[in-house]
Image: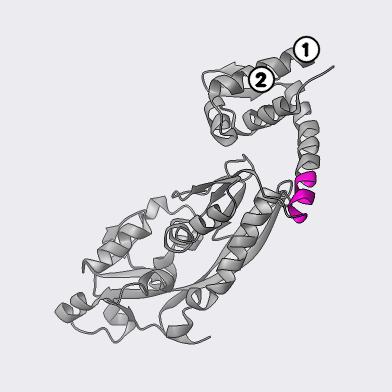
Amino acid sequence: MQFDWDDLRHFLAVARTRQLSAAARRLRSNHVTVSRRIDRLEKALAMRLFERSARGYTLTILGERLVAHAERMEREVEGFGETILEAGGWARGVARLSTPEGFGNFFLAERLPGFARAHPGLLVEFVTIQQIVSLSRREADLSVTLNAPGAGPYLSERIAGYRLFLYASRDYLARHGPIGTRGEVNLHPLIGYVEDMIFTPGLDYLSEILPGMRAGYQSSSIQAQLQAVLAGFGIGILPFFIASRHAELVPILPRELHLERDYWMSSHEDLAAAPRIRVLADFIRRQATEFGPIFRAEALLGA
């Protein structure tokens, strides 16, 4: 029985994404090539690995058995790649990174281009969407979240703690007067997340800092919430590392009213040692550590 390892690599991509087009994107190929590779592997093995349908590709029983063997081979290949990397070679391949909108757009986005220039053989797919991307379904290789994943074959570490405060624009406060007590906060319009679209408890700010209050302006995007505060609609809850970029934003009762959250970085344990994942994780960890004082709002509250 003879087959090409590269066909197994295509097989794993389809097994993890269940779609030819999604697998092709991960492989930097096209769906025709991926389909041809799967057909060739099935012919070489004389077995059907997938059931095809309008919903995508579903593993057969034999296909499920092959996944375990193929992943062991993948780990061996990745291990060899790690040896090359330690000897001074480049990380290569595709690494899909998922982060929350705030961390991604207001912290990491301006730093990733430098990383990409330093690693020309590595394609980073940078995903910042308003939901939790699944590591178990291999929708991401490396993920930054507000909470560590639950039980499962994952390696997770806390990479940063950050603080959030109530903010209003200087123009808003000039029109409505200063806010000196928690009770006075309740008299002003609030800006927050769409209540039934809060996909993780870490984003449920209002119920923690202002229990019983409801936002009069709601958006699933922290960018849109920031713009509403800047436009003078009312008071919003924003991370210091985002709000501090705007001199026109004023923190409201910062010592009395603030929240603390954490960022966690996780990967599937089978991928954590892969050179393409390791170099990216090391970069994110290093950048988050250097940025720590701003994440923690030390300029506002002290250490």
Dot 2 and dot 1 residues touching (CB under 8 Å): no
Residue at 39% of width from left, 67% of height from top? 206
**Cα distance, mark 2 to mark 1?**
12 Å
Looking at the rendered structure, the secondary structure element under dot 2 is helix
Quadrant of the drawing holding the N terminus: top right
Q: Residue furthest front?
A: 88
Q: Disc 2 designates what residue?
A: 38
Q: From the top left corner, tell me how far across and down residue 103 is, in percent.
A: 48, 61
Q: How many marks?
A: 2
User: In the picture provided, is 97 more to the left or to the right than 253?
Assistant: right
Q: Which residues are magenta?
A: 79-87
N-terminal label among 2 and 1: 2
Residue in front for this viewpoint, 160 or 202: 160
Residue 70 visible here: yes
In the rendered structure, does residue 82 fall within the stretch colored magenta?
A: yes
| Image quadrant where residue 164 sits | bottom left
Q: Is residue 17 above or below residue 175?
A: above
Label 1 neighbour load within 10 Å: few <14, some 14-19, many 20+: few
Q: Disc 1 designates what residue?
A: 46
User: In the picture provided, is 3 more to the left or to the right than 215?
Assistant: right
